[in-house]
Image (spheres, rainbow, N blue to C red):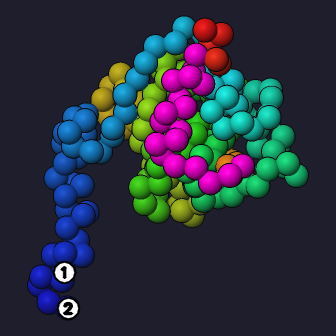
Amino acid sequence: MSAMRLILRWLPLLLAVALAGCAGSRASGVNLASASSYPGLSCVPFARELTGMHLYGDAGNWWSAASGRYARSSQPEVGGVLVFRPTARLRSGHVSVVSRVLGERRIHVIQANWVPDELDMDQLVVDVSEANDWSAVRVWYPPSGQMGAHVYPTYGFILPLAPTTHDTLAGAAEPAAVRASGG
């Protein structure tokens, strides 16, 4: 393999490593998250409003509630719902909506209440599972301006009812947050 082909092959990885030092910068493209405040907003009603999935109860119960009603997968799709398992940190679990698939192990999500009362747009989530099956993730944490230190177990993705796009989800996120927060 020629030196130029090697450089071109590894350039994206080298660029990502070089930019890691400024991961908090929106200009870096590492995390494009923006946030809006919605008192009383929580993840379940927001995800339901944004996706149209008629699932109820705690976020951690969405996986079993989707069985037989919605397709489920270990691979992300735009518009799909990533379901976090309940843990000591996430007592009721958590759900977020995939807004972009960036690569095999990186996605952006739109989610409510990861930071209390906040709607976060295009927040980075990275698959850190050994099997590359999205069963364990790390999530960008806006208050620290970097990837969160904790690894969260997940069930996987509830797939969207119909194909959608990032722009469609982004345009619908604020109205969904208003409806979900009772505004």
As helix, strand or loop, the secondary structure at mark 2 comes to: loop
Residue type at mark 1?
A: Leu
Which quadrant holds the C terminus?
top right
- 106 vs 65, left or right, is left
Residue drawn at the location 65% of the way across and 18% of the way down = 180
Residue 148 visible? The answer is no
| Residue 113 x, y percent position in the rendering | 55, 21
**Residue at image mark 1:** 6
For label 2, count other residues whose C-alpha is less than 10 Å away and answer few (under 14), some (14-19) or many (20+): few
Residue drawn at the location 67% of the way across and 28% of the way down = 49
Q: Is residue 177 magenta?
A: yes
In the rendered structure, find residue 175 and report the number of the disc placed on it: none
Q: Nearer the viewer, residue 64 or 152?
A: 64
Q: Nearer the viewer, residue 6 or 55?
A: 55
Mark 1 or mark 2: name the one nearer the start of the chain: 2
Asked if the residue at tag 2 contacts the one at tag 1, i.e. Cβ–Cβ closer than 8 Å, the answer is yes
Q: Residue furthest left?
A: 3
Residue type at mark 2?
A: Met
Q: Is residue 175 magenta?
A: yes
| Residue 3 x, y percent position in the rendering | 11, 84
Residue drawn at the location 48% of the way across and 36% of the way down = 170
As helix, strand or loop, the secondary structure at mark 1 comes to: helix
Residue 53 visible? The answer is yes
**Residue at image mark 2:** 1
Which quadrant holds the N terminus?
bottom left
Q: Nearer the viewer, residue 98 or 125?
A: 98
Mark 1 → mark 2, Cα distance in angstroms:
7 Å
What's the magenta region?
A: 161-178
Q: Chief secondary structure of the magenta span?
A: helix
| Residue 57 x, y percent position in the rendering | 80, 26
